[in-house]
Image (spheres, grey):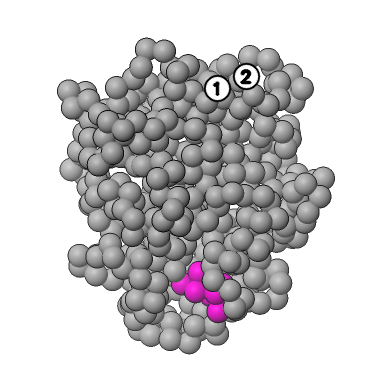
Amino acid sequence: MNPSRRNRVHIRRNLDLVTDRNPHEVPAEHLGLEPSVPQAIHQAFVDLYRTGLHPGIQLCIRRRGDILFDRAIGYAAGVASDDPLQGALREMRRDTPVCLFSSSKAVTAMLVHKCAEDGLVDLDALVTDTIPEYGQCGKHTTTVKHLLAHQAGIPRIPMKRPDPSLLWDWDRAVATLCAAKPIHGSGEQQAYHAITAGFILGEIVQRVSGLSLNDYLARHIAEPMGMHNFHYGLPAARHAEVARNAFTGGPLPAPLRPIARRVLGVDFDRVPPISNSPEFMNAVIPAGNLYATAEEASRFFEMLRAGGRYQGKQIFAPETIARAVTPVGRIRLDRTLLMPVRFSMGMILGEKPFGLYGPDCRGAYGHLGFMNIVCWADPAREISAALLTTGKTLAPSALYRLMQLMATIGGSIPRQSPDAPHLARAA
């Protein structure tokens, strides 16, 4: 990390030396696109890396099920100023596991939807039907749907000074949230639940299925889809493979600090070192520590885009996907994020004229992870994609280049029709 450049990574002159490309990318013209599309996306991808604010980046884009773009750039470890491994450079590869942070929520939500598909839980039922002790302090009217849609009234860990160790103590986390007093009645407001709802949703999955969350994930998604990573946390023997996260850029401007603390529970710059700790990587944090590669995350969203089908296997029923990506209501001012957001039961939805997933992305769905990770499907463009980054920053240049990359993807891959459905026809 170069201190003279405000906590940024030194960029090598020859980026080919730190770029890993999938040799099996399908030519754009075979996928109904202009031949220049991959190069345009690559240039925007490189421009994001050249900000020096992301030590490592992965991007995978599928079009109609085939891989259009699958590349990694930079370093997975050894460049951040606070990295104990500083100087021991390890390149970011396409198979390097990366923490998805809040993009994990989309996967956890789909596990709950799988439980509903199999008749193990009713999404309109009370949480107390499965977790009786959750009904304390007025939460007896909260439904599973309220948790999935960020309307359950428990957006923050109920501690004046949240202790990160709570994240790796499952039973303590669940008990703390069961005893919590909601900030509003269930369904009355929308306030993004950064960490909290994930533990209760994960507990529901475990109680109704009789399996641990990772075992349920493996049985229904990771194993049938051939995922090597795709796991909440990773075994200690694999910690050395993980891409390490880094706080980059200057300190947050004063107006953003309380917002970041409200969302994350701790100061923004504390999160990267916490996420690099063995305790974090060993833990199961349903809303925040699923590990995957960009290709695996794209594969997951491609399965959703294809109506729940992957390589001849029906992972989810098409009706389950349709329910999971249907808006729960109009776009609303989120009381945590202080910006308008439209949610489904588990997904952040795209908007017009510009949304999280680029220009004119109404009908797209997916999730954001710690500001600079985006995983999504856009059925109208027939794509599924994942952008994974390790720089944790709100520096304007990083956000601008990220938006430019998203705009390039959306602008170079046209919508097939203005009213394209949420789902592609299952293969």
Question: Nearest the camera: 25 or 379?
Answer: 25
Q: In this rendering, would 133 be left or right of 176?
A: right
Q: Which residue carries the number 2 mark?
A: 37
Q: Amino acid at mark 1?
A: Ile
Q: Position of residue 408 (x, y in %)?
A: 54, 24
What residue sits 68% from the left and 51% below the top? 225
- Gap in angstroms between the C-alphas marked 2 and 1: 6 Å
What residue sits 53% from the left and 34% below the top? 94
Question: Nearest the camera: 324 or 308?
Answer: 308
Q: Secondary structure at mark 1?
A: helix
The local crowd at label 2, few if under 14, some if 14 to 19, many if 20 or more residues have their Cα within 10 Å, is some
Q: In this rendering, would 235 be left or right of 397?
A: right
Q: Is residue 142 above or below residue 304?
A: below
* Quadrant placement of the N terminus: top left
State which region is magenta: 200-207
What residue sits 41% from the left and 13% below the top? 14
Q: Position of residue 182 (x, y in %)?
A: 35, 74
Residue 423 visible, this orientation: no
Q: Secondary structure at mark 2?
A: helix
Q: Is residue 412 above or below residue 298?
A: above
Q: Position of residue 135 (x, y in %)?
A: 43, 84
Please give the count of numbered marks on the rendered protein.
2
Secondary structure, magenta segment, majority class: helix
Q: Which residue carries the number 1 mark?
A: 41
